[in-house]
């Protein structure tokens, strides 16, 4: 079973009114990913998630690899949500998500990431 499939545990993409009716919303994605990471050793979970996207072992995730991984294992996540996720992970805007970028985002507050993606300021 792919790491993406494990994250969602068979979720069919029904976001229960939280999205636009076109699959998994960003909020639901972040909630599912966060829950999965907190259920296992955090460092191991981050490594496993990164490897799921960096399937060729290049040490980075390209936009195409990210889109392909979601397309193959989480079709219910709409492309525009995948694009938002990639843009947030690509901290230095070089078109690649390094392991450092990936760890940095997941070690920081994903709640703040959610709010940035939705154009809101996080509350304290």
Image: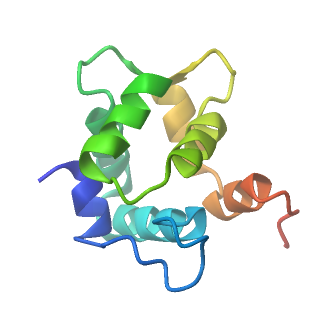
Q: Residue at x 32, y 38 (%)?
A: 69
x and y, in percent, of residue 62 in the image: 45, 21
Q: Is residue 31 above or below residue 2?
A: below
- Image coordinates for residue 47, horizontal then vertical, percent: 32, 40
Q: How many marks?
A: 0
Q: Residue at x 69, y 54 (%)?
A: 113
The furthest residue to the left = 1
User: Residue at horizontal 47%, vertical 66%?
Assistant: 24
Quadrant location of residue 8?
A: bottom left
Say which residue appears at 34% left-offset and 33% top-offset.
68
Nearer-the-camera pick, 124 or 52: 52
Q: Is residue 2 left or right of residue 113?
A: left
User: In the rendered image of this protein, does residue 64 appear above or below residue 47?
Assistant: above
Q: Is residue 94 shown left or right of residue 21? A: right
From this viewpoint, is residue 9 visible?
A: yes
User: Up-down: is 52 above or below 25?
Assistant: above
Give whichever of 57, 81 is nearer the camera.
81
Q: Residue furthest front?
A: 21
Question: How far across and down, in percent of the image, does residue 45 sit?
Answer: 32, 51
Towards the viewer: 64 or 115: 64
In the picture, the quarter occupied by the C terminus is bottom right
Q: Position of residue 17 (x, y in %)?
A: 57, 84
Q: Is residue 47 visible?
A: no
Visual colour scheme: rainbow
Drawn side of residue 105 relative to residue 5, left or right = right
């Amino acid at each position: 079973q792919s790491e993406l499939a494990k994250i969602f545990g068979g979720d069919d993409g029904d976001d229960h009114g939280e999205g636009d009716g076109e699959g998994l919303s960003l909020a639901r994605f972040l909630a599912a990913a966060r829950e999965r990471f907190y259920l296992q050793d955090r460092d191991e979970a981050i490594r496993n998630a990164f490897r799921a996207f960096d399937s060729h072992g290049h040490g980075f995730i390209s936009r195409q690899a990210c889109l392909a991984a979601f397309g193959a294992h989480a079709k219910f996540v709409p492309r525009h949500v995948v694009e938002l996720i990639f843009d947030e992970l690509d901290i230095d805007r070089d078109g690649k998500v390094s392991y450092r970028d990936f760890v940095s985002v997941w070690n920081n507050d994903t709640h703040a990431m959610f709010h940035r993606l939705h154009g809101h300021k996080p509350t304290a």
